[in-house]
Amino acid sequence: MSATFEEVCFLLLYERLPIKQELEDFKLSLAQKRNIPENIISLLKILPIDMNPMDVLQTTIPLLVQNDKTIEKPAIEHTLFSAENLIAGISTITAAWDRIRNNKKVIPPDMELGHAANFLYMLNNEKPGDELTQFFDTALVLHAEHSFNASTFTARQVASTKAHIYSAVSAAIGSLSGALHGGANVRVMKMLKEIGSVDKIDAYIDNILSSKGLIMGLGHAVYQTDDPRAIILAPMSKRMGQITNQPQWYELSRQLEKKGKAAFKSKKQREIFCNVDFYSASLFYTMGIATDLFTPIFAVSRVSGWAAHVIEEQFAMAAPKPSLYRPGAEYIGDYCGPDECTFIDIDDR
């Protein structure tokens, strides 16, 4: 990748790539916002350790507002400050929660490290090497923005009410936590573990086809070709498998993709395509990241895209007047007939 995650964040928020000094200033600004309020850490320490990490994020992300004195001043420059606060803060909260639930000391952020390297450092208490940092940074870039999916639409809908950006992002996290939106790469990894080895792929695919099931990570609601992000993630997954002596997960993914596509084309007379989750699963797993952190890491990246959409919704879309999302509804059912719509006194029901 030619651009770092910080450059992409700047691009999303300011709609242009930064010059060198702007990038340095932006990186410093993000680094300075990594320290979250101590009461958030205190809250994390009293939450049940088996709590879903996405529920933890939705519980704690709104509390980042307490560090933001600009929130009552609706102006684009103030919302940009809030966006940076969220991009930095969600990273710290995610890493801190994983440390706390594993009975490990919370690692303070390192101001000298870039965003990707700092997250891995706070997660593992070990500064990552250049190759690992580059791979994780690239993964963050690839997940930063992807148009109007469910969580992005949720963020914009909340933003259209003029609620502040912390509320919009919290709502987006709630949307992402749903099984039909986030967690696809979690299910990919579960599938890979269930298959276990390359020699069991054929039987697995036959069972999927006979039961009208799905191969997780294959099939896409938007692309009629392989997701270009998956094409970038695949060789990174292969290399991480080599580095960590876990080549089986990439090889299993590669063979499953090849055989799955061929089987669907032959027996179902239709093509299926690889999506971003298919190879991000084995990539994150070989990085040593807990499977249930895959979706929070999506949020660590996508918060930049959510923030950009909120800013557009509240400012670029505000002229000549703000637009509140107010969907219409047409009643087409037959439940409420004449009798059912007549109020009956409680003693006569």
Image (cartoon, rainbow, N blue to C red):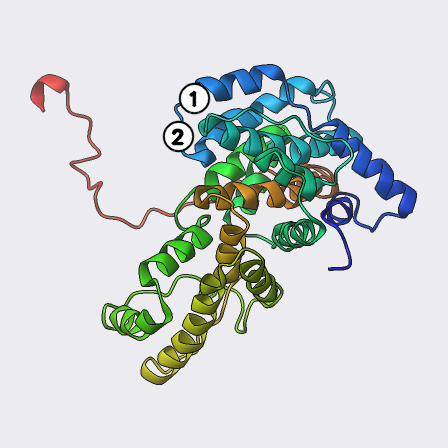
Q: Which mark is drawn over residue 47?
A: 1
Q: List x then y, in percent, for residue 163.
A: 60, 28
In the image: residue 107, left or right of residue 206: right
Query: Would residue 57 be seen by someone viewing this image from the given angle?
Result: no
Q: List x then y, in percent, for residue 175.
A: 47, 41
Q: Which mark is drawn over residue 210?
A: none
In the image: residue 328, left or right of residue 345: right
* Local crowd size for mark 1, using a 10 Å CA cut-off: few (<14), some (14–19), many (≥20): few
The residue nearer to you, when weighing 218 against 104, is 104
Q: Which secondary structure, mark 1?
A: loop
Q: List x then y, in percent, for residue 87.
A: 67, 36
Query: Would residue 191 be seen by someone viewing this image from the given angle?
Result: yes
Q: List x then y, in percent, for residue 164.
A: 63, 28
Three-letter amino acid code at the position of disc 2: Met
* Quarter holding residue 321: top right
Q: Residue at x 40, y 61 (%)?
A: 216
Image position of 304 with respect to 108: above or below: below
Q: Residue at x 58, y 37 (%)?
A: 124
Quadrant of the rendering where the N terminus is positioned: bottom right
Q: Residue at x 48, y 55 (%)?
A: 281
Image position of 329 with respect to 41: above or below: below
Q: Which mark is drawn over residue 51?
A: 2
* Quarter holding residue 325: top right
Three-letter amino acid code at the position of disc 1: Leu
